[in-house]
Amino acid sequence: MRALATAAALLLTAAAAFGLTVELRESAAVQGPRVTLSDVAKMRHAGESAEALGRAELAFIPEGESETTVGPDSVRRALRAAGLSPAHILVKGASKCRVTREAAGTTEAGRLAGALESFLEARTGERGFSVSDIRLDFDVENVARPVVVAARPKALSGRIRFDVAQAGSPGRVLGHAFATVTRRVEALVAVRRVPRGHTIGPADVAVCAVEADRAEGCVREVSAAVGRRAVVALEPGTCVSRSFLEKEDLIKRGDSVELEVGSKGLKVTLKTEALESGTAGELLRLRRAGSRREYIARVLGPGRAAPVDGGGE
């Protein structure tokens, strides 16, 4: 891994040394939700790092939407994230690029990808499969209605070889498709850049299907993020993890709080008012109505707390 990281760093350094010219197109089309640099622009003087830089993500088109727009600022921001200095980046061409997301099945490649995913769903009885990095040993343009008749290995995960035939003649294998298979699950994704400290709004995020390994630890509902501040900058396409969000206060100042006093054998609940806000596990001050006495308590959950030994007046 260290060797790969070092090689990538050397490629980026080489591109930076000579300067990188990016020529933005006026329009582009993508098959999936991600919009990369190679989708919308031509690169010059990128050298051997062209392929790596071309994978830099500029935008994300969620399910249910068909287009977005990217401009020079999106290009510079993505390349800065890839390790290039703005001083070594020249963006020219169109002032903005209109990117449309093509519906699955509208092209030969789209129909083949759909056939691979349909086979996976039928074979496993599960949904949410995604295929990528497809390589063929036959001409897909000559196959109007491709179907998959077999696949190896049986695990159907990782790099898979599919036997492809024409619908109506499943006994005659025309060739093979080699593709990387991943599972997709629903997770909350940033659909535009969210600066650090920004309060997330409904237009900033959407629930999308993403690779299962990327969704680990991420929230699954819009309501879990809207109204909370981002503690890190979120780029388009980033799965929103709970660790990226400011902790949510379970008790807010002025809330009515049940203070659970006593042991397992005998427990009394006191009605108190929160003098400050706090989240799970944090300490805060509480006070009973009509009393000056203050309790130091630990937040147990919404509207619930337990006193800390030595809580003061």
Image (cartoon, grey):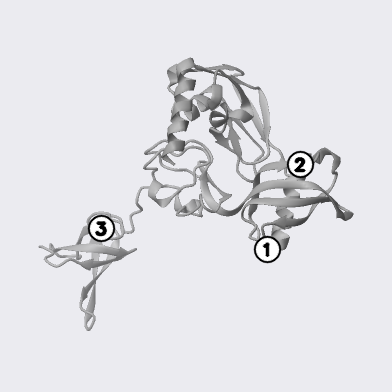
Tags 1 and 3 in contact by the CB under 8 Å rule? Answer: no
Q: CA distance from mark 1 to mark 2?
A: 25 Å
Which residue is depicted at the point 67% across and 61% down?
A: 154
Report the residue marked by disc 2: 137
Disc 3 marks a residue whose amino acid type is Glu
Circle nearer the N terminus (1, 3): 1
Q: Judge depth for marks 1 and 2 and give the one in front.
A: 2
Q: CA distance from mark 2 to mark 3?
A: 60 Å
- The answer to whether 39 is drawn above or below residue 155 in the figure is above
Residue 182, percent from left and from top: 60, 52
Q: Residue furthest right?
A: 168
Q: Position of residue 161 (x, y in %)?
A: 70, 51
Residue tagged 1: 124
Element class at badge 1: helix
Marks 1/2 in contact by CB < 8 Å: the verdict is no
Label 1 vs label 3: CA separation?
A: 46 Å
Task: Name the amino acid type tagged 2.
Answer: Asp
Q: Residues within 10 Å of mark 3 (few under 14, many from 20)?
A: some
Is 45 located above or below residue 51 in the figure? above
Q: Nearer the viewer, mark 2 or mark 3?
A: 2
Q: Is residue 46 above or below residue 308?
A: above
Q: Which mark is residue 282?
A: 3
Label 1 vs label 3, nearer the camera: 1
- Within 10 Å of disc 1 (Cα), the crowding (few <14, some 14-19, many 20+) is few
Q: Is residue 4 left or right of residue 186?
A: left
Q: Residue furthest front?
A: 3
Where does the image place residue 261, in percent across and percent down from the top left? 20, 73
Three-letter amino acid code of the residue under disc 1: Thr
Residue at the image position 75 percent from the left and 41 percent from the top? 109
